[in-house]
């Protein structure tokens, strides 16, 4: 159960949060995508990045303070926690965006598998674009092959699918940390896709078996069946009770 | 439920559609496989590609108009929709061939796992040959290593299996988009193969457990068991009713 | 059901077959592993390869003729069929060895998962060593990087695990066909390992759930429970019948 | 069941074992990480490695002798056995550390999936750091690209995730054996992650199905249902017995 104050807070800050997050992304991504920006604009954008980060982390702290069980809250929101603490690693700051997925979760409806699929699809898209930005920021100017956003995007795709041709690869430590996170994400995606198909297949095969059972009378007796039987015995007792004792 | 007009249309156009699709493939693939074709023939083939595309897209529009619930129809036929809309990206036009798989689905019979296996096998074969053509069309003349159909085919195989040696890789944007689609297909294939084996294994293990349950009398009571019991109680009531009241 | 003549044949030829298969491997592998063999020995070994292949294919034909339903037999023994027909592709002849796995299957006992694991382990080992020989035979003398058996073995391992660094890769058509088969095997192995773990995990989680059900009385009623109830009702009827009618 | 002497031994040596293992790692890793150590210190560390290995193997032998069924003990502790026998391959000695996971297993509590996840996480971390040390020890001084610990760590990560860019790869036999073990570990990790997600998804989908069954009365009759019915019949018999015979 969530306390009323928590829910009220969530509802009120939901959309402002999305706006601040997008502002953060724009201010973070622009100087990476266009390295020829004048110094003044570059500085302004850096300030915006710092300010938005302060706002986002502040909001997380407020939610933490409003939470009934704070340890549980931290354990249930590892992405938000990482996003609040990680900014020391500058390019990883973008992981902040992942908390947008939590918004999606607050809104999402539909079948379990459909929601898992939506979640995975949104995560992958976000992670690929985020990872490309972060790796480009780390690698530009190094001796590695990743020097444009196009290359970085292509590298993200071949990394998250674990193909790894080797035409693009990071050479800096930060770039390799980002790569490791992308690979982990890739293993998770592979696992979830497989699990989704397996769960669908197992369910369908079981449904077919149950239908066969129903047709052959070998389905397990349902609670309704036993209920009917109980009714039968009760009526028997009533009939017996209705007869006059000899 | 499908409306009669829909089914009639489907039956009538099935085979003409296959012929037109094959014509499309031939006219698309020939100039890619043999880059030394004379200009006149090259132009004729380009016209055939355009005409067959018009016919195939037209057929899709007719089926869309005949459909009862048009949004549902679009959602259920994403491949046909993509094939109708994507031709702006020329090399992706070949995805049109994927709708042949829908024909397969209309015809296919057999166990669920067998049908899924057939579907995956046919898809992979089609995707590998299609992807090779598309990537060759995009890469020929670029500075990348993929310059012959043999190389393109080899590249498709190592991409869809996510091996990715790196002896072959695309360098153009279109080539990389095709590569991304192949990788997605590869993840899907891996997932489906795994899911198929897992579903088989889970089913076998459960069957063995059920057999053991049957032998030890710990199988769940079936509806037939309870039915027999109910019969017993009914006969008891009849016997009671047959006795003269004292 | 197998006919007596079939079973008798199987029992009698089992061990001679293993000997002939090993002879085939030795005669096939030796000239590949040592390219400096004198011509005379090389020719003798080629003759041995041909003779053993004739014997192995002949045995397959005899089993085919003894089989009751020949189409079914062909469908159930795809590896034997491929081994009998494929020898046109010389390096693929080694796949003949895979039929040894069928022997394993005739002998194997134990839990389903244990047997699947044994089968996968033996297949992978055989495929890796076989694939290395076949690819070395195809690649030696080409411009590719695979020139020693050590390199070929290392290449097989990184291919079947779908890692594919790209330090080794085939450049000939035959080598690439062998690579494709190894990749397919790799996908199968990944799938089976995953499926085995998943099936174990699903079973354990279900067992825990069933134990909880038993403790809380929410386990499904077993056939034994209903049997006991039926006994109760029968005794009631007997007691009633034993009373003198009024 | 374990014999009292076994359990007593386990409890007493648990923490000393961890200390000795860490000593082993330190003495093994230091000269690999810093190749400029003076010869005297290098020799001392080699002696520590040998001594700690003797202690660890001795402890394994004691546990083997205390075990009731020794073959079973060997089969249930393959990692300990390998760690005791493998030291011939010097870099593989580090696998000794894997027995720390057995300690974890003796202590671990929680849900099955949680424990499997913890086990996999700890194994992967240990394997990546161990594999990096072993491969660096084997590759340093060779013509291969892996020459610093940073490179070795990066190589381990891209190998265990089966990405394999090809910027780093082993060229020595020992390095390739370590790589093979890492790839096997990678396949196991992929499989376990997928299996965990699949098992969660299957369980959730089944739970939803059971809830629906409960609401519609189509859940299987529980043992409690049948028990209640039996009670009903027993009361009927008692009532009948209480009536005076006519």
Image (cartoon, coloured by chain):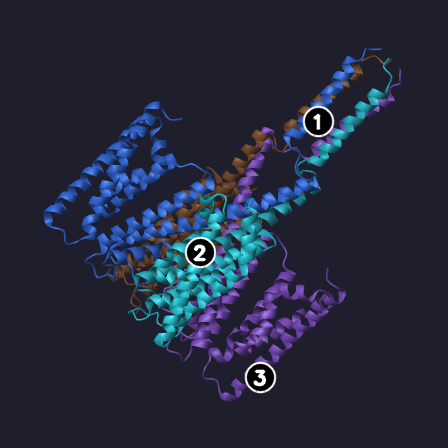
Chain colours: A cyan, B purple, C brown, D blue
Pointer 3 residue: B47
Q: Do labels 2 and 1 share a chain?
A: no
* SS assignment at label 3: helix
**Residue at mark 2 to residue at mark 3: CA–CA distance:** 62 Å
Callout 2: chain: A
Residue plotted at (50% across, 38% down): C204
Indicate the secondary structure of the residue bearing disc 1. Answer: helix
Q: Name the residue under label 2.
A: A58
Q: Which of marks 2 and 1 is in front?
A: 2
Q: Do the residues labelled 2 and 3 touch (CB within 8 Å)?
A: no
Q: Which of D86 and D119 is in front in this view?
A: D119
Residue D75 visible (yes or no): yes
Query: Image check: D10 left or right of B211?
Result: left
**Which quadrant is the N terminus of chain D positioned in?**
top left
Question: Could you say where residue A159 lies in the image, as x and y percent from the top left?
Answer: 40, 62
Q: Is residue A202 above or below residue D109?
A: below
Marking on residue D229: 1
Q: Position of residue D196 (x, y in %)?
A: 47, 46
Q: Mark 1 lies on which chain?
A: D
Report the residue at 67% width, 69% height from top: B14
Q: Helix, strand, or loop for circle 2?
A: helix
């Amino acid at each position: 159960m969530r306390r009323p104050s928590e829910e009220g807070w969530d509802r009120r800050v939901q959309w402002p949060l999305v706006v601040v997050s997008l502002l953060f992304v724009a201010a973070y991504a622009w100087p990476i995508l266009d390295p020829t920006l004048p110094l003044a604009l570059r500085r302004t954008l850096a300030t915006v990045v710092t300010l938005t980060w302060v706002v986002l982390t502040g909001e997380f702290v407020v939610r933490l303070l409003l939470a009934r069980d704070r340890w549980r809250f931290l354990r249930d929101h590892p992405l938000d926690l990482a996003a609040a603490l990680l900014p020391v690693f500058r390019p990883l700051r973008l992981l902040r965006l992942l908390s947008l997925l939590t918004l999606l979760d607050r809104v999402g409806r539909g079948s379990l598998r459909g929601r898992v699929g939506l979640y995975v699809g949104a995560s992958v898209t976000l992670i690929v674009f985020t990872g490309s930005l972060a790796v480009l920021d780390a690698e530009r100017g190094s001796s590695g092959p990743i020097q444009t956003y196009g290359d970085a995007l292509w590298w993200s795709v071949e990394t998250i699918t674990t193909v790894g041709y080797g035409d693009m690869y990071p050479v800096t430590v930060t770039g390799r940390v980002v790569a490791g996170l992308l690979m982990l994400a890739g293993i998770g995606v592979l696992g979830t896709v497989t699990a989704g198909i397996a769960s669908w297949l197992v369910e369908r095969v079981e449904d077919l078996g149950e239908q066969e059972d129903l047709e052959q009378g070998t389905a397990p007796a349902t609670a309704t069946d036993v209920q009917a039987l109980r009714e039968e015995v009760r009526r028997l007792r009533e009939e017996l009770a209705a007869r006059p004792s000899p």
